[in-house]
Image: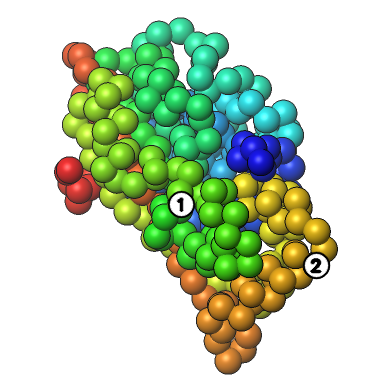
Amino acid sequence: MSEQRFDVWAAGAAYERYMGRWSRLVAEEFAAWLDCAADLRWLDVGCGTGVLSAVVSARCRPRTVPGVDRSEGFVRSARIAAPGPAHFVVADAMSLPLRDGTWDAAVSGLTLNFLPEPTAAVAEMARVVRPGGLVATYVWDYAEGMGFLRRFWDAAVEVAPSARALDEGRRFPVCRPERLRGVWLDAGLTDVSTTPIEVPTVFAGFADLWEPFLSGQGPAAGYVASLAPADRDRLRDTLGAALPRRPDGCVELTARAWAVSGRKQGDMGTPRRGIRKQASQQ
């Protein structure tokens, strides 16, 4: 069974209900943490449906924010939803169609773990920023901090132990602060900092949590789509029984992401405000 065949990211509306509503909250905290000056040239790598580009456009007063993603479906959604100065093109994060040293900041949201060579991808982001430019990302803490996915995979393994091989917490070890720091250092970046970002994920009821897993977007939903109806029902019931519920039926969990940032070596030229001092240095 191929792990990668479940990693489908194509339908913007389905992604929005499955993950976009939570990733937007993280993007807001990430942009606040970076605390960059206005009028910078930003690049959003693996832009998806344009969530991070939209936040940067609204909060950071950028000169420009092009977003690149290899999913044509996501790029179409981003073009509809994100405001100017953001704009979007279909391109591969592993081979950016951009000149060296032309951007002030290259950022990426919830993408790094899905790229075939994370260190090479970060080095490619560093290639296109100016000396002293910022390279930063955030990724879900699949192993411990992504509450509803952690409970989903625990239930999946309880129903079918073979699902363990597809567990995102197992597949994506880069989604931890020490591994992220190592990738940034291996890519030649300096002033490396990491910080956790935790956001609430409150579901109106179990259906609000379960139904997005039927969309086919991402590893967990792709796994659900592969199951026979009876096995899918067993997984649904096992997950439902394991979730905490408030008296009104709401399911209240949290989701943690890890953010990392670093600087490209070289003369920074015109001073720019960097990330906040409360960022943890590791």
Residue 253: image location, x then y, percent? 49, 71
Taking the spot 38% from the left edge, 40% from the top edge, the residue there is 174
Give the residue type at disc 2: Ala
Extreme residue in the right direction: 229
Q: What amino acid is labelled 1 in the image?
A: Gly
Lateral position of residue 73 relative to residue 97, left or right: right
Q: Residues within 10 Å of mark 1 (few under 14, many from 20)?
A: many
Q: Residue furthest front?
A: 161
Question: In which quarter of the view is residue 117 placed?
Answer: top left
Residue 213: which quarter of the image?
bottom right
Q: Position of residue 126 (x, y in %)?
A: 36, 19
Which residue is tagged 1? 169
Q: Nearer the viewer, residue 50 or 229?
A: 229
Residue 186 in view (yes/no)? yes
Residue positioned 51% across, 19% down in the render: 94
**Which residue is tagged 2?**
230
